[in-house]
Image: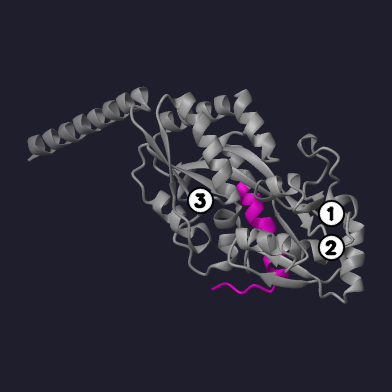
Amino acid sequence: MQATRSLTLLLVAALGVGAAQTATAASQDYPSRPIRLIIPNAAGAAVDTLGRIFANTLTQVAGQQIVVDNRGGAGGLIGMEIGKDAIPDGYTLLSASTAAMVIGPHIHKKLPFDPMKDYAFISLFGITPNIVVVNPSIPVKSVKELLEYNKSRGGKSNMASAGAGSQSHLAGVLFLQLAKSEALHVPYKGGGASVAAVVGGESQWTITPAPAVAGLIKGGKLRAIAHTLATKSVLLGDLPSAAETVPGYQYGGWNGLLAPIKTPKPILAKLHAMVVKTSQNPEFRKHFETQMTEVVTNSPEEFRKFVEDEIKAMGPVVKSAGLQPF
């Protein structure tokens, strides 16, 4: 009996060593084939645009094709769940952002994932300001004039958003709350529709991710009056921060790289190094600059703490918006 038990222990130990050697070998060869990058948003969205720019340069750094897989729907929850359940071998990654990771926990009673427990954090790769834009036909060229405009219309100017609980909705709620101003929230089915409504004059203004409106601003179809970072940004030129008129206002977006939680640490370390190298690529930085987005990287621990703090800060904003978890 003792001999049988000893033999079993030896077999288990041998299997463990074999598995460790296999994992080590896989890590050393990584990446040896194309990598899938899940973007939990529809093609053409601001998050998708940035994710694709990132994927193109990461392909050069990795020496393997980074294949973008758009899995939009349910505010990003579908894509996040697919990423959570993927094989943790480094060949399925997630380009995560604010909507699902930060807003999702506050507006859904049952998330199909835990943002802090189901993923390995690798690094941020971008911080995106939102831009306060107005239809060029209205007499508004500054935040101060927008607040006066809202007041002159008795709080009935139309503030477009990508839908209740969207980043543009919550950014607007916080802005109006801190500015002690009023406007009529008009939710649309997605960011594209809300921006189009402002371009067409159906709504007068919105606060939306910079990549979604960069081209429209340059083309004169929208007027940018402020950004939502705490201070001025070199990438945004002379565009003022909304906080200069509305003290304390700040509401940016972000993009970061995640992997399934059990992805081997040596692979995660390689991925982090690849993100840092990608961030240093001049062409990559130039493309992000055209999207009014700052290139930012950090350690896995810093990235995790960043998201944790963002989730905590979002609670009061969701409450102010009167949103009930569903």
**Label drawn at residue 281:** none
- Asked if disc 2 and disc 1 are in contact, CB closer than 8 Å, the reply is yes
Task: Please name the residue shown 79% across and 60% down the image.
Answer: 135
User: Looking at the image, which is closer to me, 312 or 111?
Assistant: 111
Look at label 1 and name its amino acid: Gly
Looking at the rendered structure, the kind of residue marked 2 is: Leu
Judging by the rendered image, the residue that carries numbered circle 2 is: 178
| Distance between the alpha carbons at the discs numbered 2 and 3 | 33 Å
Looking at the image, which is closer to me, 323 or 110?
A: 323
| Picture coordinates of residue 103, whole percent (x, y) | 60, 60
Predominant SS of the magenta segment: helix
Q: Quick check: marks 2 and 3 in contact, CB under 8 Å? A: no
**Residue 69, x across and y down, in percent:** 42, 46
Tell me if I can see residue 146 in this picture.
Answer: yes
- The answer, for residue 122, to whether it is visible in the render is no
Within 10 Å of disc 2 (Cα), the crowding (few <14, some 14-19, many 20+) is few
Report whether 272 appears left or right of 188.
left
Between discs 2 and 3, the one toward the N terminus: 3
Which residue is label 1 attached to? Answer: 248
Looking at the figure, which quarter contains the N terminus?
top left
Mark 3 = which residue?
43
Q: Earlier in the sequence, mark 1 or mark 3?
A: 3
Label 2 or label 3, whichever lies nearer to me, is 3
Q: Which residues are magenta?
A: 307-326
Task: Measure how far apart labels 1 and 3 are at the Cα level.
Answer: 33 Å
Dot 3: element: loop
Label 3 crowding class (10 Å Cα cut-off): few <14, some 14-19, many 20+? some
Toward which corner of the image does residue 304 lie, by quadrant?
Answer: top right
- Image quadrant in which you'd find residue 236: top right
Left or right of 11? Residue 1 is: left
